Amino acid sequence: MANVVITGGAGFLGARLARDLLAAGSLDVAGDGERPLSRVTLLDRVAAPPDLAASDRVTVAEGDLAGLVAPGQAGRYALAGADVVFHLAAAVSGECETDFDLGIRANLHATEALFAACRAVGTIPLVVFSSSIAVFGGSPELPLPAVVEDRTLPNPQTSYGIQKFIGEQLLADYTRKGFLRGRSIRLMTVSVRPGRPNAAASGFMSGIIREPLAGQRAVCPVDPAAEVALASPARAIEALRCAVTSPDDVWGGRTAVTMPGLTVTVGDMVAALAQVAGPEVTSLIDWVPDPAVAGMVSGWAAHFHSDRAARLGLAPDPDFTSIIRKHLADTQPR
Ligand SMILES: NC(=O)c1ccc[n+]([C@@H]2O[C@H](COP(=O)([O-])OP(=O)(O)OC[C@H]3O[C@@H](n4cnc5c(N)ncnc54)[C@H](O)[C@@H]3O)[C@@H](O)[C@H]2O)c1
């Protein structure tokens, strides 16, 4: 049997991952063969979506992660019985920039508390950490290379990126010490994110598609020539699952794996939207340059070459039109 804990399990990727695992009904842990999925426990400070909360294979514990995994608390009991822990709970990039203390609490202290609790239960679970390409950045003494490769040294330029990089390093050390089996996967910016806008600095990469498709106006704060790297929700979930299913020798070490990304210009994204939904939809986009956002975006890595991810069988989305079509299929009422 496979018993799974998902922190941030009420969030966008956490809930989607839970549904995906439940639908599959079994999980291969590190190449040991498929095992029936016995339980998925969602740890989050907000309520789980009703469909998941209603499932008899799902347990929900609501509260701040650091408190939930303390001795005697529901999260600690869940970790004691877990074979696999997906650590997805985090404050998003924009929140961490505007509220430094929130980022330290949610992304650093809660992560440390989780890893310490995984160690304390003594069962050496497989722990997947959802890192981010925000670990990459450039500074005068260490500029960002034209293409980010597996050996590129992370040089984060935001609080969120720093917190993710610390999480990767901490997980690697817990793994080296034999306290758990850690695997960090750096996710691309996910587009198209359904639902309401969030406080991520990259939020416009979903907003300029999602809102016009829903008949609402959207603001694009960057130039059409701006280049970004992204992945569909399905590819992000695939990367998270791959971090569990790969045998140790195939995963290839304690350093983080960068998932593949599709590189597009923002103009390409809007052209794809016009192709799928027509020019009347793209006319709902207002191009209002925001120098602060444009400055951030120009500092992000947009070209990736990840041999490790390719060896794991991960591939980028083929093009942005397929991402939009998948978003429509996922969100339109059946
Ligand atoms: N979505 C993306 O584009 C993207 C890209 C790179 C990395 N990631 C990472 O993937 C993970 C999931 O992202 P998402 O888009 O689903 O985010 P999300 O904001 O939708 O979900 C995160 C969840 O974590 C919960 N949470 C935050 N702090 C908590 C705390 N202290 N205690 C308990 N719960 C807490 C939130 O309530 C939320 O439900 C995050 O770690 C994020 O940094 C996401």
Image (spheres, rainbow, N blue to C red):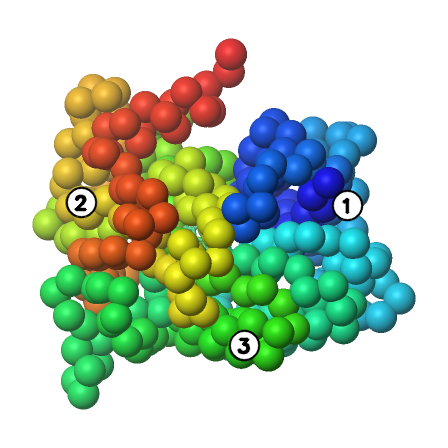
> Which residue: 26% across, 56% down?
306
Q: Is residue 279 left or right of residue 153?
A: left
Name the residue that disc number 3 marks. Answer: 176
Name the residue that disc number 1 marks. Answer: 60
Q: Earlier in the sequence, mark 1 or mark 2?
A: 1
> Which residue: 28% across, 37% down?
317
User: What distance separates the C-alpha of mark 3 from that of mark 1?
Assistant: 31 Å
Name the residue that disc number 2 marks. Answer: 264
* Comparing labels 3 and 2, the label whose residue is closer to the camera: 3
Position of the N terminus, as image quadrant, is top right
User: What distance separates the C-alpha of mark 1 from that of mark 2?
Assistant: 38 Å
* Comparing labels 3 and 1, the label whose residue is closer to the camera: 3
Q: Is residue 117 left or right of residue 200?
A: right
What is the crowding at mark 2: few (fewer than 14 residues within 10 Å), some, or many (at least 20)? some
Residue 68 visible here: no
Q: Earlier in the sequence, mark 3 or mark 2?
A: 3
Q: Which mark is residue 235?
A: none
> Which residue: 50% across, 61% down?
183
Picture layout, residue 180 above or below residue 243:
below
Picture layout, residue 274 above or below residue 219:
above
* Three-letter code for the amino acid on which mark 1 is drawn: Val
SS for tag 2?
strand
Residue farthest to the right? Answer: 72
In the rendering, at what x and y percent does residue 105 appear?
61, 74
